[in-house]
Amino acid sequence: MIELKNINKSYKDKSVYSDFNFNIESNKITAILGESGSGKTTLLNMIAGITDYTGEIKNKPKKVSFVFQNAVLIPSLTVLENIKLVVPDISDEEIISELMKMGLNSVYNFYPKSLSGGMARRVAIIRAMLFNGDVMLLDEPFSSLDISLKSYLIRKIKEYQKESGKTVIFVTHDIGEALSLADRIAVISDGKIIKDVKSVKKDTEKELFDTLMSLGEYE
Amino acid sequence: MKTRKNKRITDIILTIIPVITILLLWGVLAIIIDNKFILPTLKETFSAFIGNFTSKIFYKALFLTLLRALIAFTVSLIIAFTLALLSERENALKIIAPIIAIIRALPTIAIVLLVLLWTNSYIAPMIVTTLVVLPTLYTDIKNSFSVIGKDQIIMCKTFNVGKGDFIKKVALPEIMPEFLNTVGSNLSLNLKLMVAAEVIASTANSVGLLLNQGKVYFETAKMLSIVAVVVIIGLIIEYLFAFVSKKAGKWQ
């Protein structure tokens, strides 16, 4: 279990987290749901060790598979080289096979500028899966993707988690995404967990919707 | 395919048009002026141009000028690269920025005259060229570093990409196209400045001195032919580096 204890984080004068406490269960998919600027990405960055903070994160993962919001592929490297950069020991055949599984046939020698947003996102997810980190972190992985691709990727991530048994944490502002992927959903606002749904039930959607409505998210 | 070919032909025509216009204008003016000491004809200049390549003195002067330009540029490049690298640290940038601003503001002629007082006519043009090219080179190299996005650096750190791999596989390939372009255009500028400094310093065995002698003996055609050689060499350097830069940036 990853335990965040008494976390404080601020950017210049703006406090994002103040005395924040949160536990993330291992081997499950946890969704962090919240409006823009609520500190969702900062939470992932703190777990990944990208940003500094005060407080303590117990059982902080040493190796993190991160799917960044905008894919972040190296423009001067082909798809194959991008994956090999972070997973150097893997064979080309294995990468190509993984790409094909994700519906990315014959793009292995493409440069990122030739990929669509959805393709780049899928490459970033494959890279993160093959990196085989202790934890997988996904920052708004489905934003601006069409519905069919979104549901396809949700299925793939679920399969990955089931097969690997890894801890997956993803942030989103979309209730539907959270409901279809997560085992647990935590709603975050102004650096505080205001709702924690530990098991998704029939009325969870309404509960989450009411919570976000009270924040003015869907006004 | 056809459109690409047509575009290429259009590009070539558009490049040639200004050259032909200048040559035509020159030809017409030379006929109107009718004085080879003021403006020789194209034919006279072309004869002088060919004549240059039969003279050992010209070859020696050209070789030594190019050598001096190359030495000055290499020194400038090393200093500019080091300073640009150091400028990535905020505190270092605060020290380096005003120094570069001062060097940039120095009047070129004043530097030539002062450095001539302190050194000799062989070394002075090299110091001057190094100093004058340095600020432009520094700014260009510093800008080429900025092509590596902060998010790429974070991604590499998160996925434990080693420093060696980061430099070899991420930083260098991304910087290289812009860097090569910078080297090409500044090498050309460097050559132009070297000749100017040699003219003022009257450096022995130099293109600058040949131009000076041309002025003294009213050999205008010879002067123009030497200028043409310098221009052609400058253009070749610039186009060559632009070509290599394009190859290095095939991913762009």
Image (tube, coloured by chain):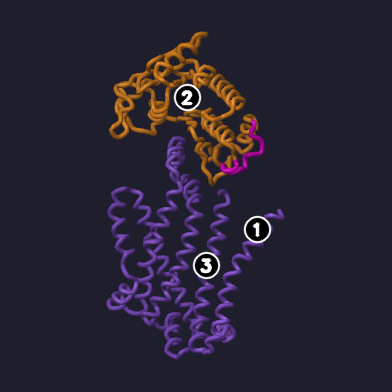
Q: Nearer the viewer, mark 1 or mark 3?
A: 1
Quadrant holding the N terminus of chain A:
top left
What number is the disc on residue B237? 3
Mark 1 lies on a secondary structure that is helix
Among numbered discs 1 and 3, the one appearing first in the sequence: 1
Which residue does the image show at 63% across and 65% down from the upper left? Answer: B12
Which residue does the image show at 46% across and 15% down from the upper left? Answer: A209
Q: CA distance from mark 2 to mark 1?
A: 47 Å
User: On the image, numbered disc 2 is attached to which residue?
Assistant: A172
Mark 2 lies on a secondary structure that is strand
What number is the disc on residue B7? 1
Residue type at mark 1 is Lys
Magenta stretch? Answer: A103-114
Chain A visual colour: orange
Q: CA distance from mark 1 to mark 3?
A: 24 Å
Residue type at mark 3 is Ile
Chain containing mark 3: B
Query: Hey, which residue is sitting farthest bottom in the picture?
Result: B217
Chain containing mark 2: A
Residue type at mark 2 is Thr
Which residue does the image show at 40% across and 61% down from the upper left? Answer: B136
Q: Position of residue B232 (x, y in %)?
A: 54, 73
Relative to the observer, which residue lies in front, B151 or A203? A203
Tell whether position A115 is magenta.
no
